[in-house]
Image (cartoon, coloured by chain):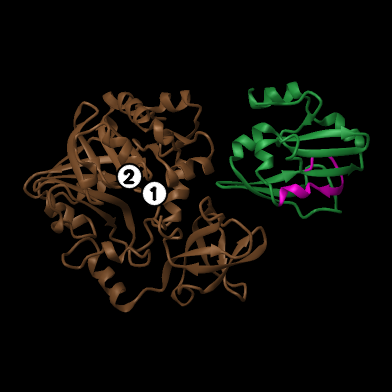
Amino acid sequence: MKNTALSSKHISLGAKMVPFAGYNMPVSYSGLNEEHLTVRTAVGVFDVSHMGEFILKGKHALDLIQRVTSNDASVLTDGKVQYSCLPNDKGGIVDDLLVYRIDSETYLLVVNASNIEKDWNWISDHNSLDVEMKNISEATSLLAIQGPYALATLQKLTDVKLSDMPYYTFKKGVFNGVENVIISNTGYTGAGGFELYFPNEVAEKMWDAIFEAGKEYGIKPIGLGARDTLRLEMGFCLYGNDIDDSTSPIEAGLGWITKFSKEFTNSKKFLEQKEKGVLKKLIGFEMIDRGIPRHDYEIVNAEGKIIGKVTSGTQSPSLQKGIGMGYVPVSSSKADSEIYIRIRDKNLKAKVVKTPFLKNA
Amino acid sequence: MNFPENLKYTKDHEWVRVEGNIAIIGITDFAQGELGDIVYVEIETQGEDLKHEEVFGTVEAVKTVSDLFMPVSGKVLEVNPKLVSNPEGVNKDPYGNGWMIRVEMSNPSEVKNLMTVADYKALIGH
């Protein structure tokens, strides 16, 4: 099992460690609910160095990205970030990812840890135009600093004016004395904040400086457990749960990152789905009866017939009720539709809701 | 972590306090820590006669769900009424406010099969 540059730091802080995507990762420190609420109300730090980073460089870098991703990367300018996905040729998704335009011939792709090898092979197989590809995942550390006090915390450590940076933009700059840190106004929590990319060698120094800067705001380390409940309250998809090799971006509600202004892997099929409609859709639901939906639980209709499966579910720490996502037939996918979740041999009532579950996060 | 000397333990991480033919049952400090924040405890077996190792309820944490097993055979006389409004009591005070059920043992000799605190600590590598 691999360690991040900060694994020993997490252990010394008393984190509960779990294997995740081949890495020894912190799942919680002080407790999931407390960590979750820290991010919603103050500021928290996630070590997400297990994520993968690829650099694509050359005259045809954009052509390759346009070919393999579903969103239209030609609209990016230097310093912009885009959420996108890599469709496969069977109608599903290889992975979801972020595309950073560093300059017109240099892009950074950020992919899920569990898919690094699969994505690398997939993009390489489509690289017919000799784009230079570099996998910098193992040498790169990534910290997500999230919450309403993330900006105030980080501003102490850089001259880059963070409040001038719009959502989904980034700057390369000096941070805590380290040059060329990628400071990115992105995150997976809906709480606001930044993500920082830098070499492993400076990881401990960065971690310590950020915690010192955030002390007055009650900064805390946050584990993967709270990362999952935070993203789920926003209705953000998790690859492997809500989207995978068999789900289409149109079914998953990712039509907004599926652009037909260009041709890409399987774009014809997705265009057809968009025009003719799909049979099932990814929905969000809230429990009405008391119960906690979990991954793989069955979704049934009022007659008790199985109509789908829960892809993600949890007790929402902010809303104090069970929330989840899952695929159901389009006929049951409208907001306020009554559905039931089968929990330990009981069909418990739930209703379809629009995501995000947490409004005004 | 705290493991009182006067209790008996099981490999499924329940504790048992024996008072004559009555057994008071909950989950250990180790178990509550592993589960994380407990959201609710569902026990619908009050009044039932259950055998050793049968499921008497379920505990739901934010991330996981886990069955609760009878350490001994007997009739479930009472479920801790505080668990409904205060499930986090299991996290905060697993041997006190977080107790779960009171059982009238049908075969008190089963108690000798339960683990001592030393055996239990060895099991969890504490």
Q: State yes or no: discs 2 and 1 in contact (Cβ < 8 Å).
A: yes
- Residue that label 2 marks: A193
Q: Is residue B27 left or right of residue B74?
A: left
- Across and down, in percent, residue A189 comes to 39, 49
Mark 1 residue type: Thr
Task: Give the extent of the magenta segment.
Answer: B70-84
Which residue is the site of mark 1?
A189
Residue A241 in view (yes/no): no
Which image quadrant: the C terminus of chain A? bottom left
Asked where in the image residue A223 lies, by quadrant, the reply is top left
Q: Quadrant of residue A301?
A: bottom right
Residue A137: percent from left, percent from top: 27, 36
Q: Secondary structure at mark 2?
A: strand
Of A137 and A102, the residue lying toward us: A102
Q: Is residue B90 left or right of residue A298?
A: right
Figure check: A20 above or below A311? above
Q: Which amino acid type is marked by label 2?
A: Gly
Q: Is residue B43 above or below residue A268?
A: above
Q: Nearer the viewer, residue A257 or A1?
A: A257
What is the display colour for chain B? green
Of all residues, the one furthest to the front in this rendering is: A216
Quadrant containing the N terminus of chain A is top left
Q: Residues within 10 Å of mark 2 (few under 14, many from 20)?
A: many
